[in-house]
Image (tube, rainbow, N blue to C red):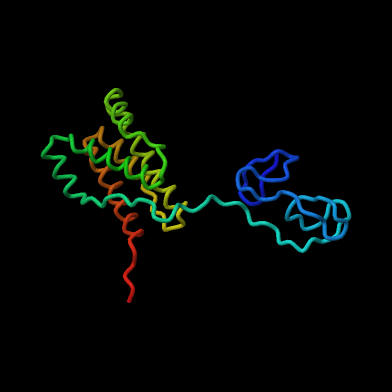
Amino acid sequence: MTSCPYCAHEVDSGARVCKNCGRALVQRCVACAEDIPVLAPLCPLCKSPQNYPAPKAATPPPPAAGAPIGEERNILVILLLWFLTCGIWGLVAFYQIGSDLNAHRKRNDLSPGVDILLGFLTCGLWFVYAVYKYAQVLREISEEEGGPVQDVTTICLVLQVAKYFGCPGIVSVMVLQNEMNTHWNRHQPTPRS
């Protein structure tokens, strides 16, 4: 197995066309007219230069334009609703964060409903992992989009562990939502002057 020089998708060693991107994987040598690997700088048979630039390293495609932007939520309102509902709103806020991350990535990698259920079944221990995982996904999104990355994974992990020592668990959810609000603001169109 080899990789396509255009999309980095694995292809069979004898393939002439990439099944993933549809581009040719072979070319004719400019000197001896034999089939050689596409974009080869030198013909492996006659060693003549081919005048093709080397391909750039394959990078993951940028997120699709118009990726859904999650809802910006006021973290003080989340805290107030958490108090008024005796903590139930924390689960709602956690579910909303997971849903927004899935919608923005256009993938369903996260399962906020399952994470909430596992959080109950493990007496809250799963939430330590889940909040850390959601913060990690937000960091990965920022890295994929090439924007500034504010890594809150460690902060969220420490705050989730601190809930066992008296710190309310909603604080880590608020930190995560605040970072998401910042990310959504980066996607807003800038006004033209």
Q: Quadrant of residue 85?
A: top left
Q: Where in the figure is residue 117, as x and y percent of width and height?
A: 29, 27
Q: Where in the figure is residue 151, as x and y percent of width and height?
A: 39, 50
Of residues 75 and 6, the one drawn nearer to the viewer in this rendering: 6
Q: Residue at x 31, y 56 (%)?
A: 182
Where the N terminus falls, by quadrant? top right
Q: Is residue 151 above or below residue 188?
A: above
Q: Residue at x 29, y 22 (%)?
A: 121
Q: Quadrant of residue 188?
A: bottom left
Q: Where in the figure is residue 28, as x and y percent of width and height?
A: 80, 55
Answer with left or right where residue 16 lies relative to residue 20.
right
Q: Residue furthest top?
A: 121
Of residues 9 and 130, the one drawn nearer to the viewer in this rendering: 9
Q: Where in the figure is residue 4, as x and y percent of width and height?
A: 66, 47
Q: Is residue 57 above or below residue 153?
A: below
Where the C terminus falls, by quadrant? bottom left
Q: Quadrant of residue 120?
A: top left
Q: Is residue 88 above or below residue 5?
A: above
Q: Residue furthest left?
A: 84
Q: Residue at x 41, y 46 (%)?
A: 105
Q: Residue at x 45, y 52 (%)?
A: 63
How many discs appear?
0
Of residues 22 and 141, the one drawn nearer to the viewer in this rendering: 22
Answer with left or right where residue 24 lies relative to residue 45.
left
Q: Residue furthest bottom?
A: 193
Answer with left or right where residue 42 lies relative to residue 39.
right
